[in-house]
Image (cartoon, rainbow, N blue to C red):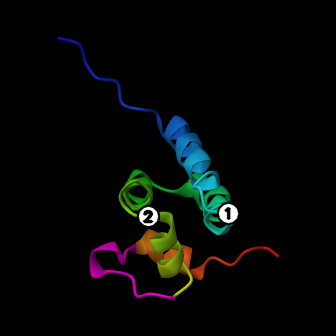
Amino acid sequence: MTEIQREDIETRRKRLLHRSLYTGMKEVDILLGGFARQHLPTFTEQELDQYETLLKNYDDPQIYAWAIGREPVPPHLDNGVMKLLKAYKLPF
């Protein structure tokens, strides 16, 4: 029986950064790319889990609407990472 190797944290951060930069929607690329560059290097495993769940399970336009406050964040996603995303301001 072989043991499944767990992805190391730095590889995971790089993968999530890439996913954040290439969402398919330019506005989301800019928002999530900047957010990921700023926050992924210091995220804990739990925060990476929260962020990855968001990216994997929700459409880019929906994430964008929640992040900019156009729509309310569902209670089950109202966590620390989403609060950081909503507070994130683009540097320009």
Read off the residue under disc 2: 59
* Residue 63 image point, x, y percent: 48, 71
**Residue at the top extreme of this rendering:** 1
Residue 33 shown left or right of residue 23 in the figure: right
For this rendering, which residue is in front, 22 or 17?
22
Residue 27 falls in image quadrant: bottom right
Residue at figure coordinates x 62%, y 51% from the top left: 22
The residue sitting at 65% across, 59% down in the picture is 33
Locate the N terminus by quadrant. Answer: top left
Residue at image point 54% right, 41% down = 15
Residue 7 painted magenta: no
Return the x and y of residue 60 as percentages of the image width and height: 50, 65
**Location of residue 49 with respect to 12 vertically, above or below:** below
Three-letter code, disc 2: Asp
Q: Amino acid at mark 1?
A: Lys
Nearer to the camera, 64 or 16: 64
Q: In this rendering, is residue 18 above or below 76?
A: above
Q: Check disc 1: other Cα within 10 Å, few if <14, some if 14-19, many if 20+.
A: few
**How far apart are labels 1 and 2 at the CA level?**
13 Å
Q: Quadrant of residue 23?
A: bottom right
Region of the chain picked out in magenta, as a range: 70-79
Element carrying mark 1: helix
Q: Main secondary structure of the magenta part?
A: loop
To which quarter of the image does residue 46 belong?
A: bottom left
Residue 78 is a magenta residue: yes
- The tag on residue 73 is none
| Element marked by disc 2 | loop
Precedes in sequence: disc 1 or disc 2: 1
Q: Which residue is mark 1?
A: 26
Instruction: Determine whether 9 is above or below 37 in the image.
Output: above
